[in-house]
Structures are given as structure tokens and as C-alpha cells.
Amino acid sequence: MFPGPVPIREGAVMELWKDGLVVLIQMPQCSRDEARAFKAGFKRYAYLESATAVPIAMWIFDFPKPHGPIDCNFNAKIVDQARIASYLDTTEGIKNAVTFYLLDGRMLRGIKFVGLNPAAVELFHETIRKQLELGYATEDYARYLSSMMSYSTDELLEMGRGFRHGR
């Protein structure tokens, strides 16, 4: 059983916890093959900042079939600002680790701890800073996010700046 709150809907949610960046993947009725694909990990991923008035930070991680690619977004305005400040602080180096949790309801099916390319994380930091500088409402973010969700996950992966992971 997962010890904390879990996403209700299928898909991925990116959060910033005290210990760092986290992606919660909710996959109801997760098959054995999907869990294996998750555990095998992704070989490529992309980072995309939308060209909308409110910049949307999008990460797309391409897991092997049958799991497939997942996308998640991040809105810095809804995160504890002290936690954001700590994450953006690079005096001891860039914090490029992300922990993935594969969930089937409240059942934890897998955990992966991954180091992202520091160049990708720097792009993410730039988007976070832009978000923090802008005065937008949650509804504005949701509207621009909705426009980004008109693209498929595969299209978002191709639109973003690509990075390789592993060998």
C-alpha cells in the first residue's frame, strides 16, 4: 500500500516533495508486462516549455511497450514556495533526481530513482522561474494546459527537446 495520497485518475502527476521531484503514475489494473516495462525504465525523454502566455512545463518519459510514453506537467504556483526555492538553489549542485512511483490504485507496483540530464533540469528551472514571475490564476494555467493536451503524448515527445537516458 502506498503511504500517501494517490492520484485518482489514470495518468502521471509531477510533484515536488521535501525529498525532491516525484512522478506518481496511476495505472489501474496494471498488467505484469506494464510493470516490467516500468521497471526496465525509459531510454529517452523530452522536456517541453509551451509557447503559451502561461508557460507550461511538460516532461515526457518514453517507457518501453506496452507501458508507453507518459507526460506530466508542473505548476510552480501551487507548490510551497520554500520548497521551490530549495529546489532551485544550485549552490550544492543541480538537483536532477526524480523518483517514479507506479501505482495501481493504492497498491505500489514499482519505484524507480532516476538522474535526469542537468541540461534538461536547467530548462525546467527556467520555466519555473517564468511561472513564478507571472501573475496568473489557476484557471489560466488550466486553460493553457488544456490547449497543450490537444496534442498526443507522442506528439509532445517529438515537440520537446529530447534527451537519452541510460545506455
Image (spheres, rainbow, N blue to C red):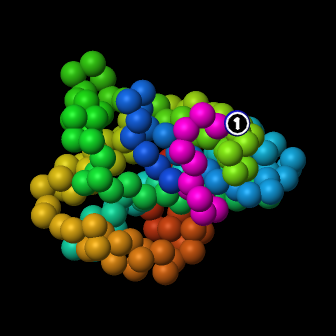
Q: Is residue 24 visible?
A: yes
Where in the figure is residue 79, as x and y percent of width and height? 30, 47
User: Is 16 displayed left or right of 164 in the figure?
Assistant: left
Where in the figure is residue 82, as x and y percent of width and height? 22, 35
Q: Residues within 10 Å of mark 1 (few under 14, many from 20)?
A: few
Measuring 64% from the left and 54% from the top, which residue is drawn there?
A: 26
Q: Is residue 84 above or below residue 146?
A: above
Segment tinted magenta in the rendering: 2-12
Where in the figure is residue 98, as x and y percent of width and height? 49, 36
Q: Is residue 161 above or below residue 97?
A: below
- Main secondary structure of the magenta stretch: loop
Measuring 22% from the left and 73% from the top, which residue is drawn there?
A: 53
User: Is 160 displayed left or right of 135 in the figure?
Assistant: right
- Label count reads 1
For the N terminus, the quadrant is: top right
Query: Regarding mark 1 in the picture, which secondary structure is present there?
Result: loop
Viewer-nearest residue: 130 or 45: 130
User: Is 165 displayed left or right of 38 in the figure?
Assistant: left
Report the residue marked by disc 1: 1
Measuring 33% from the left and 63% from the top, which residue is drawn there?
A: 56
For the C terminus, the quadrant is: top right
Q: Residue furthest top?
A: 92
Q: Is residue 86 above or below residue 61?
A: above
Badge 1 amino acid: Met
Q: Is residue 46 visible?
A: no
Viewer-nearest residue: 47 or 74: 74
Measuring 57% from the left and 74% from the top, which residue is drawn there?
A: 152
Viewer-nearest residue: 27 or 112: 27
The answer to which quarter of the image holds residue 12 is bottom right
Where in the figure is residue 157, as x and y percent of width and height? 53, 63
Does residue 56 belong to the magenta stretch?
no
Viewer-nearest residue: 29 or 85: 29
